[in-house]
Structures are given as structure tokens and as C-alpha cells.
Image: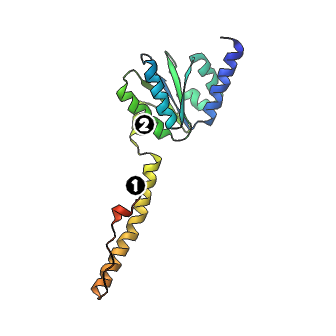
């Protein structure tokens, strides 16, 4: 590999690391080409990218990112960096789910918001609900008190002789996750 190509690779890794909200180092040794292609497709859907890197070039690129340099000290063997550009939790889920199906994929370490993630933290991240699911839960939480208030007011009106209003079904009115 030419020196100019190495410099381009280091610059590319450094730029992607600057854009990413999080990153993971994965070992893909033993995976078939079709499996790697499927993983890349799943990661693309999660707004992330997997880049196979040479360890020395990655370590050189991490020098301009102290948090990454501290988090990714185990750069031995065949490695790829998975850059999470949008939602780190979604990428952790995609990697964990794919790792259940393909045992050859090993998540070595990760980084999110400048903090190193070990194996336990990555597994915990993979169990958290995604951003859309959290939004739906929040909206349901906001909807519930007003629904209960409407029910109480309706019962009070019925008690005082008013014609009952149609029943409100909170489950049907709530946004679906």
C-alpha cells in the first residue's frame, strides 16, 4: 500500500470518527462474504457504516480523537469499525442481533459520547428501546392523564343526568410503537 493511500485511509477514518455519535470495533474473522454483506445492509438501515481497517492505520487515525484512542486499545486481529452516525442504540441492537445468528461476529469494544463501552455496557445498550419506541411510550404517557380526566368528567355528567358520551378507548387512540 502506498504512503499516499495510507494517508487517505487515515484521514477517512478520522473524518468518520468525527461525524459519528458512537463507534464499535468488531472482529469478523470466520464470517462468509454473504454474511458480511448482510451485516452491512442491516447497518446501513440503522444509519451506520462498517469499514474494514488496518490496525496501524486505525490507531494512527485515533490519535486525533483522544476518547477513541483510549476506548479502542484492543486492535489486534481482523477488525472493522462500525460508525454509528445517528442512533447508537439501534446500531448496538443490530450488531447484537446479528451476533446471535452469526457466532463469528464478535463485538470487541465500543464508544459513545466520548465514553468507552465494555461488553456489558454494549449488551445493555442493545436491550434499550429505540428512539421511535421511546417517543411512542412518551406520547402514551402524555395521553393517559387526559383520557382519564375525560372518563371522570363523563361519569360525573352521567351521574347528574346527562346523556353518556361514546367510550374512549385509550389503546386505540394511542400511537403505535
Secondary structure, mark 2, is: helix
**Rendering quarter of residue 2:** top right
Q: Position of residue 115 (x, y in %)?
A: 53, 36
Q: Residues within 10 Å of mark 1 (few under 14, many from 20)?
A: few
Is residue 43 placed above or below 149 in the rendered structure? above
Is residue 116 placed above or below 160 in the rendered structure? above
**Rendering quarter of residue 102:** top left
Residue at the location (40% across, 30% down)?
Answer: 98
Q: Which colour assignment does the render follow?
A: rainbow
Q: Which residue of the protein is positioned furthest toward the bottom in this rendering?
A: 161
Q: In front: 14, or 44?
A: 44
Tell me if residue 116 can be seen: no
State the separation of the CA atoms marked 2 and 1. 20 Å
Please report whichever mark, 2 or 1, sits nearer to the chain's N-terminal start.
2
Q: Nearer the viewer, mark 2 or mark 1?
A: 1
Q: Position of residue 124 (x, y in %)?
A: 40, 38
Q: Residues within 10 Å of mark 2 (few under 14, many from 20)?
A: many
Residue at the location (65% across, 22% down)?
Answer: 10
Tell me if residue 18 can be seen: yes
Q: Is residue 97 left or right of residue 50?
A: left
Q: Position of residue 52 (x, y in %)?
A: 54, 21
Residue at the location (65% across, 31% down)?
Answer: 15
How many numbered marks appear?
Answer: 2
**Rendering quarter of residue 171:** bottom left
Q: Position of residue 17 (x, y in %)?
A: 61, 31
Q: Quadrant of the N terminus?
A: top right
Q: Is residue 53 left or right of residue 141?
A: right
Label 1: which residue?
176
Q: Which mark is residue 93?
A: 2
Secondary structure, mark 1, is: loop
Amino acid at each position: 500500500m502506498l504512503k499516499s493511500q495510507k494517508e487517505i485511509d487515515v484521514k477517512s477514518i478520522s473524518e468518520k470518527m468525527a461525524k459519528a455519535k458512537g463507534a464499535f470495533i468488531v472482529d469478523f474473522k470466520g464470517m462468509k462474504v454473504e454474511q458480511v454483506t448482510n451485516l452491512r445492509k442491516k447497518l446501513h438501515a440503522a444509519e451506520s457504516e462498517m469499514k474494514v481497517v488496518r490496525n496501524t492505520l486505525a490507531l494512527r487515525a485515533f490519535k486525533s480523537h483522544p476518547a477513541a484512542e483510549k476506548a479502542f486499545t484492543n486492535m489486534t486481529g481482523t477488525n472493522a469499525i462500525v460508525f454509528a452516525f445517528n442512533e447508537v442504540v439501534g446500531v448496538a441492537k443490530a450488531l447484537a442481533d446479528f451476533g446471535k445468528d452469526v457466532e463469528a461476529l464478535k463485538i470487541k469494544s465500543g464508544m459513545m459520547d466520548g465514553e468507552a463501552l465494555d461488553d456489558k455496557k454494549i449488551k445493555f445498550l442493545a436491550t434499550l428501546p429505540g428512539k421511535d419506541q421511546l417517543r411512542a411510550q412518551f406520547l402514551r404517557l402524555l395521553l393517559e392523564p387526559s383520557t382519564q380526566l375525560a372518563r371522570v368528567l363523563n361519569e360525573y355528567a352521567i351521574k347528574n343526568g346527562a346523556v353518556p358520551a361514546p367510550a374512549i378507548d385509550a389503546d386505540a387512540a394511542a400511537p403505535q410503537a
